[in-house]
Image (cartoon, rainbow, N blue to C red):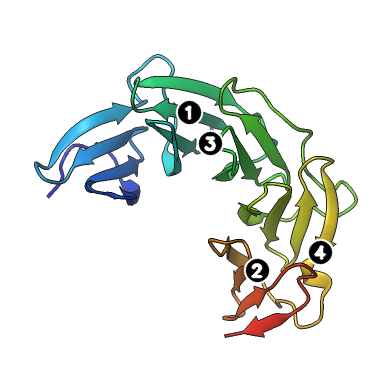
Amino acid sequence: MLSGHKGYASSCQYVPNKDADLITSSGDQTCVLWDMTTGQRVSVFSGESPSGHTADVLRYHWISRSMHRIYLFLVHLTQQLVCGIAAKVLELSVHIRPKGRCEHCKIFPDGQRFGTGSDDGACRLFDVRTGMSSRSTISNTMMVVYQQNSIGFSISGRLLFVGYSNGDCYVWGTSLAKVVLNLGSLQNSHNGRISCLGLSADGSALCTGCWDIDLKVRFPPDLTMVITR
């Protein structure tokens, strides 16, 4: 048993290729790196540190760059993101200030940036190195704001896929913050809230999951072939 958090555990994941390393996030405003061979905490991110979280930590994503492991932590309520660089135990506090709760974050394929999605219907891109916004806010001001349930980048990083609560899945061009395609407008699209989405490792297929109990797989370049499983 791992004991150390002072609040509920919101997520837990093993570090890829490191079976002895587990990271947990919690409602106690911290993330913890555990050594599973000893059951002891190796590092504690945020919480009591001056630049730490001031609200529940919901989930995290990680990337590997050079010899350093970089963890991106997503928090709740305060609209704040904290990047913890494990090798140096540094923290970068990023205030994104959306009009709604920040619910999702994904690492950009180049490892230098990350994207966020919030309840205000907008996605934002940030530079990990500076904490500053690196692109214009990605949002469609012409449509009713629907909650975002999942986001993901294409392999090249030129496209951002965003699943919404009304069943739409917008494909955004990240360089110009323009809509390329709405997959929800295609034939045989979802009939309910999109709950998750993911791309294959080689970027050749996009899978979306929905409350209509269907999974649909779309294949580039035209993304018009839909398979329901």
Q: Which residue is mark 3?
A: 77
Q: Left or right: 27 with respect to 169?
A: left
Please tell me whether residue 210 is drawn above or below residue 177 in the rendered image.
Answer: below
Which label is found at residue 82? 1
Disc number at residue 193?
2
Q: CA distance from mark 1 to mark 4?
A: 32 Å
Going from the N terminus, do you reach mark 3 or mark 4 first?
A: 3
Please give the name of the residue rendered at 73% of the width and 56% of the height, measured from the top-left corner.
Answer: 146
Q: Is residue 64 or residue 198 the one in the foreground?
A: 64
- Which residue does the numbered mark 4 point to in the structure image? 182
Classify mark 4: residues with Cα within 10 Å, few (<14), some (14-19) or many (20+).
some
- Earlier in the chain: of badge 3 and badge 1, it is 3
How far apart in space, not on screen, are marks 3 and 1 (Cα)? 14 Å
In the rendered structure, the answer to whether residue 6 lies left or right of residue 132 reads left
* N-term mark: 4 or 2: 4
Q: Residue type at mark 4?
A: Asn
Callout 3 secondary element: loop
Give the number of the mark in front: 3 or 4: 4
Give, as a three-letter code, the residue at label 2: Arg
Which residue is painted at 64% across and 44% down in the image?
118
Q: Is residue 89 above or below residue 13?
A: above
| 201 over 127 or under it: above or below | below
Q: Secondary structure at mark 4?
A: strand
Q: Quadrant of residue 144?
A: bottom right
Residue at (41, 27) in percent of width and height: 84
- Give left or right: position of 125 versus 31: right
Q: Earlier in the sequence, mark 1 or mark 4?
A: 1
Q: Given the image, on which type of amino acid does mark 3 rest?
A: Leu
